[in-house]
Each structure stands twice: as structure tokens, then as C-alpha cells.
């Protein structure tokens, strides 16, 4: 008399396990996968016309194109912040989340970054976003799951939703999309220095920070 309920329970459990595995695999390979493109050069210099037409709206900058779903962005976030503290007067460091028109792949978290930035609370919640997406494999691009994360982190959902609909968020998303597209960003983190140099990390910090600061101040790379 117990066989049928047991088989039904076993079948249901099997379906749940398979569904979980499929969901996890999809999120890992299609949302977080950033290694599908061809390998890029560690340092690329743009021509004068490309620099002139750049959508970047500030001079004397180091811009980090990053993603909440990027392992190396999370790993070196503290080192990047230390480099920011070393920036000379008259220069600026800017974090820009990779973005595209479809909000897919690593760009799927761009709306979250833009909204938190406009709310003025992004820096204090960045580590939590990294942890949720990379370590816990939580898809914060899903509104329902994102709202649970917001609540867990003490962020008012109504305030978040209101901020997400502001012109400031739309403008920031458009700007990030233009920069990501113009510079053909394929991997994160990528650093754009003075609109001219595209640098991928090719050495450990703080040597890589020295390299970026040399590009910023002296317009020349440091030899490895």
C-alpha cells in the first residue's frame, strides 16, 4: 500500500532536482559566462578620431567597466579602491557597469547598479551583490529574487522601484550602454584611461595600478 506514494514522492523529488540543476547550469553558462569571446590584447590604444568621438563625458579619468557577475571584479575590488585613493588631484576614477540594449549576460545587472547608484547607496551594497550573484548563484536580474535581496539588505523596495523609473537612471543606463558599445567591451574588468587606452589586467596589484596611473599621468605604459 506504500509503494505508489513512495514512487510519487521519488518522482517529484527527481523532477525538483533536475529543474534545479538546469536552472543553475543556465545561470552559470548563459548569465555569468564571460569567457566565450576571443582573447583580447592586454593594452589597446585608440586613434585620435576615436578619442574625439568617444561618448565618455569626462577627461582625465580611469573608468573601470565591471559587472556584478564578474569574479575578477569582485576579487580585486579592494585593490581598485586603493588605486582610486592614489589618483592625483584633477583626475577621477569612475565605475561603469557593462551594459547593452538587451540587458543580458554580464550586462543583466546594469539596471541594479544604475538604480543603487542614483539612490546613492551602491558602494555599501556592492560586496553583497557580488556575493549573491557569484557565490550564491542568485539571479538579481530577476525582479522577484532581486526584491528579496533588497529586503535582506535593508533597502526599501518602493524607494528602489521609484528610483528605477527616474530620468537619472535612464540616462545612466544609456551612458553605460554607449560606452560599453563604443569601446566594444568583451571582458570585465576593462579599464579605459583618458578615453584612449583600453587595459586588461596583465599583472598583479599594486603593479597594475602603477601601470594604469602611468597611462593616466604620463600617457605611457609601464613595462612588466
Image: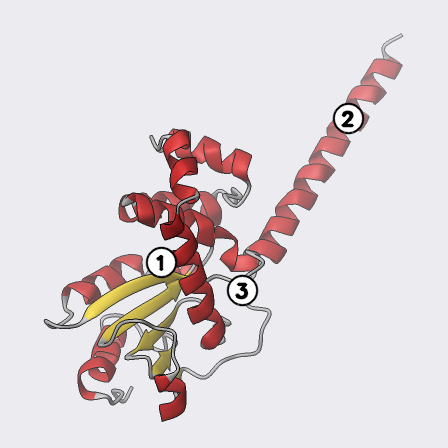
Image: 212 above or below 81: below
Relative image position of residue 90 (x, y in whole percent): 13, 72
152 or 79: nearer the viewer: 152
The earlier-in-sequence mark between 2 and 1 is 2
Q: Which residue is mark 3?
A: 34
Q: Which mark is residue 10?
A: none
Provide the secondary structure element on which disc 1 rests.
helix
Taking the image as shown, residue 136 lies to the left or right of residue 18, namely: left
Instruction: Say which residue appears at 57% left-offset and 78% top-offset.
Output: 38
Q: Quadrant of the N terminus?
A: top right
Instruction: Say which residue appears at 57% left-offset and 56% top-offset.
Output: 104
Q: CA distance from mark 3 to mark 2?
A: 34 Å
Instruction: Say which residue appears at 70% left-offset and 35% top-offset.
Output: 17
112 or 85: nearer the viewer: 112
Image: 130 above or below 223: above
Relative image position of residue 211 (x, y in whole percent): 25, 80
Q: Which residue is mark 2?
A: 12
**Which label lies toward us, 3 or 1?**
3
| Number of on-image labels | 3
Q: Which residue is mark 1?
A: 75
Which residue reaches farthest top? 1
Relative image position of residue 141 (x, y in whole percent): 52, 45
Provide the secondary structure element on which disc 3 rests.
loop
Q: CA distance from mark 2 to mark 1?
A: 39 Å
Taking the image as shown, residue 36 lies to the left or right of residue 78, namely: right
Q: Quadrant of the C terminus?
A: bottom left
Image: 170 above or below 190: above
- Can residue 130 be seen? no
169 or 72: nearer the viewer: 169
Image: 38 above or below 27: below
Which residue reaches farthest front? 167
Question: Residue 70 is drawn in which quadrant?
Answer: bottom left
Amino acid at each position: 500500500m506504500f509503494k505508489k506514494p513512495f514512487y510519487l514522492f521519488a518522482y517529484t523529488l527527481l523532477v525538483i532536482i533536475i529543474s534545479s540543476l538546469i536552472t543553475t547550469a543556465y545561470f552559470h553558462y548563459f548569465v555569468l559566462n564571460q569567457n566565450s569571446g576571443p582573447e583580447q590584447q592586454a593594452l589597446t590604444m585608440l586613434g585620435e578620431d576615436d578619442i574625439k568621438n568617444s561618448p565618455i563625458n569626462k577627461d582625465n579619468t580611469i573608468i573601470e567597466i565591471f559587472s556584478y557577475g564578474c569574479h575578477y571584479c569582485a576579487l580585486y575590488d579592494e585593490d581598485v579602491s586603493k588605486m582610486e585613493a592614489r589618483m592625483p588631484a584633477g583626475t577621477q576614477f569612475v565605475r561603469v557597469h557593462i551594459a547593452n540594449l538587451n540587458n543580458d549576460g554580464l550586462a543583466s545587472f546594469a539596471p541594479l547598479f544604475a538604480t543603487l547608484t542614483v539612490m546613492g547607496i551602491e558602494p555599501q551594497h556592492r560586496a553583497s551583490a557580488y556575493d549573491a550573484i557569484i557565490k550564491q548563484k542568485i539571479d538579481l536580474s530577476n525582479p522577484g529574487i532581486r526584491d528579496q535581496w533588497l529586503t535582506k539588505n535593508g533597502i526599501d523596495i518602493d524607494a528602489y522601484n521609484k528610483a528605477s523609473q527616474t530620468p537619472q537612471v535612464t540616462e545612466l543606463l544609456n551612458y553605460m550602454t554607449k560606452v560599453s558599445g563604443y569601446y566594444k567591451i568583451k571582458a570585465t574588468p576593462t579599464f579605459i584611461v583618458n578615453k584612449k587606452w583600453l587595459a586588461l589586467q596583465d599583472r598583479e596589484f599594486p603593479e597594475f595600478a602603477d601601470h594604469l596611473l602611468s597611462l593616466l599621468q604620463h600617457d605611457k605604459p609601464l613595462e612588466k
